[in-house]
Amino acid sequence: VEIDERVVRLCQQYLPQTAGMLDQDQRINLHFEDGLAFVKKAAPQTYDLILVDSTDPIGPGEGLFTEEFYRNCNRVLGPDGILINQHESPYYPDYAHEMKRAHHKLKAAFPIAKVYQFFIPTYPSGHWLFGFAAKTLDPIADFKPEAWQQFKLKTKYYHPDLHIPSFALPSYVREMLAEDDA
């Protein structure tokens, strides 16, 4: 689901290595509409995975960081469904505040809500956080490296040995997430 079809078409044109096959993969259905409305009207337990690659939680993307949106995502996910969203950077105060707000709202909407980190050099500070939310699956307790290995995927960053440590957050991030002032 993408609100602006032009974004997808430009990515297909200028980033063919990541978006070039979107129209040819039969597993993909592109919907060009507002993500909030799409999730709100979707039937219960329709999806296994929701990836929210949104803009920042201020301005046009703000609705994608609300408890109502997360509750709607919970409703449309199947029993073993997973939601992943970006949680901003913990480094700069304004980003850190939004990170805490997003996490507290995610925790209010899902029984399992964790934060993991990823390093993206082109993002502010390079240290970026993501939220993992689910009804039943815990990303650490239920992790099965052999399930990943059966696909024999060669990736540039991820590998099973990195999975659990990505949830090991620095002390200052853990302390911020534990604060109730979001």
Image (spheres, rainbow, N blue to C red):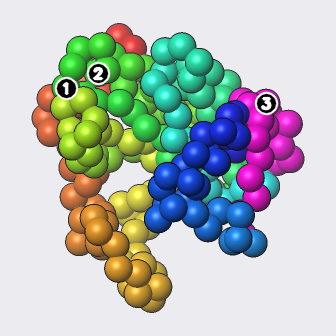
Q: Which residue is disc 1 drawn over?
A: 91
Callout 1 crowding tier (Cα within 10 Å): few <14, some 14–19, many ≥20: some
**Depth check, front residue: 62 or 21:** 21
**Mark 3 falls on what kind of element?**
helix
Mark 2 / mark 1, whichever is N-terminal? 1
Q: Which residue is disc 3 drawn over?
A: 37
Q: Which residue is disc 2 drawn over?
A: 96
Tell me, yes or no, whether the two marked residues, 2 and 1, touch with CB atoms within 8 Å.
Answer: yes
Residue 30: percent from left, percent from top:
74, 53
Residue 58, above or below 84: above
Q: In which quarter of the image is the C terminus?
A: top left
Residue 49: percent from left, percent from top:
62, 56
Residue 154, above or below 41: below
- Of the numbered discs in the image, which one, if any, rests on residue 164? none
Res 6 quadrant in image: top right
Magenta span: 27-44
Q: How far is mark 3 from mark 2, CA to CA?
A: 28 Å
